[in-house]
Image (spheres, grey):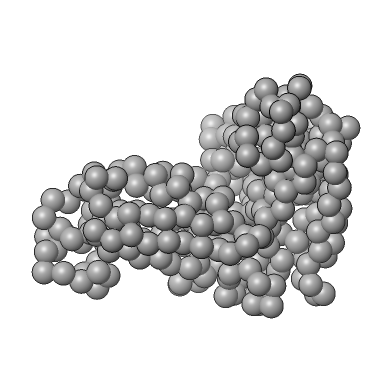
């Protein structure tokens, strides 16, 4: 079988939007089943995955002759997370489009990987050992942690005479930092062994966080919200869901569950808003289904205008 790949990209400048990026290299790639390809960003940029899946969502994207697809609407469960884990926050990554990696969401259908991503120049926060630092994206924005560690990777950052190694990182530090900061407007971090453990005894360490700031919108159940980007810019969705993941957003007495999301909500919101200058979203069970009966829900979405 022939293997096809598709790649397109544009370089855009979005300083005027107020979102904390300098330049964004926006692109998308399609890798047909059985093929592999590499995503790469220029030096100094990292990959920020916007939307990704393995499956098929139409009857035209690199179909075979004769057509080999029984299902035009199938995506492998977890494929977005797998692609994010491999590529998000990296300068480059390699992907293979096959059922061994993602499972087979629709037997008998010729599938593909599709990734929409941006190459971004992230903001960097460094906190030297025994110090505390704050990351703050400002009102109406949320932190997106792309990469983070507690340890040491060179001699220049937080210089000291106590450097026995330049290659150490606390094993769980990324997850801890992400848990503290990701999705929040601001967070405070303390660079010390009591929090992360000591990955290299005798070496002066630091926290290093690469992050971006996303615009954020919340629409409580039963309400409608319009989203608009400046002229000549369009919406690029990073995360979106309808459901509930905490008890503080859209507070209510009707909260039986704080761990529910509509499975179709990202796709529906993406189809409504992504790539458009403006859109309107309505937070109702009629649109998204009811992922948790008896619970007052909301739409939560993060995005940039590019």
Q: Where's residue 69, x and y in %?
A: 79, 34
User: Looking at the picture, does residue 1 appear above or below residue 107?
Assistant: below
The residue that appears at 56% across and 40% down in the rendered structure is 81
Tell which of 87 and 295 is nearer to you: 295
Horizontal and vertical percent for residue 173? Answer: 34, 47
Residue 13 in the image, given as x and y percentages of width and height: 66, 77
At horizontal 82% and vertical 74% (from top left) the residue drawn is 231
User: How many labels, in total?
Assistant: 0
The residue closer to the viewer here, 142 or 96, is 142
State which quarter of the image contains the C terminus: bottom right
| Residue 79 in which image quadrant | top right
**Residue 201 visible (yes or no):** yes
Residue extending furthest front?
253
Q: Is residue 3 visible?
A: no
Q: How far from the left and from the top, in percent, is residue 121? A: 52, 70
Left or right, 174 with reference to 29:
left
Closer to us: 120 or 291: 291
Q: Is residue 306 above or below residue 147?
A: below
At horizontal 72% and vertical 53% (from top left) the residue drawn is 217
Q: Which quarter of the image is occupied by the N terminus?
A: top right
Q: Is residue 63 left or right of residue 215?
A: right
Residue 85 against residue 255 in the figure, above or below: below
């Amino acid at each position: 079988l022939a293997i096809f790949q598709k790649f397109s990209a544009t370089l855009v400048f979005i300083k005027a939007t107020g979102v904390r990026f300098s330049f964004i290299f926006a692109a998308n790639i399609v890798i047909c089943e059985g093929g592999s390809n590499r995503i790469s960003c220029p030096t100094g940029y990292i990959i920020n995955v916007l939307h990704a899946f393995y499956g098929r969502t139409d009857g035209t994207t690199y179909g075979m002759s004769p057509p080999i697809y029984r299902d035009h609407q199938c995506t492998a469960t977890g494929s977005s997370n797998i692609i994010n884990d491999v590529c998000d926050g990296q300068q480059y990554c390699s992907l293979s489009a096959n059922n061994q990696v993602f499972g087979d969401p629709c037997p008998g259908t010729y599938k593909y990987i599709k990734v929409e991503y941006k190459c971004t120049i992230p903001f960097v926060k460094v906190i030297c050992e025994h110090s505390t630092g704050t990351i703050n994206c400002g009102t109406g924005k949320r932190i997106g942690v792309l990469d983070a560690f507690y340890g040491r990777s060179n001699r220049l950052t937080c210089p000291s005479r106590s450097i026995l190694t330049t290659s150490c990182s606390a094993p769980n530090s990324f997850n801890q930092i992400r848990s503290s900061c990701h999705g929040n407007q601001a967070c405070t971090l303390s660079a010390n062994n009591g929090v992360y453990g000591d990955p290299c005894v005798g070496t002066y360490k630091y926290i290093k966080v690469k992050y971006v700031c996303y615009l954020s919108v919340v629409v409580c159940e039963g309400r409608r919200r319009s989203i608009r980007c400046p002229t000549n810019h369009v919406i690029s969705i990073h995360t979106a869901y309808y459901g509930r993941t905490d008890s503080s957003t859209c507070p209510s007495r009707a909260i039986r569950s704080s761990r529910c999301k509509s499975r179709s909500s990202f796709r529906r919101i993406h189809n409504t808003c992504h790539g458009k200058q403006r859109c309107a979203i309505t937070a109702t069970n009629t649109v998204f289904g009811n992922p948790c009966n008896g619970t007052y829900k909301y739409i939560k979405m993060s995005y940039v205008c590019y």
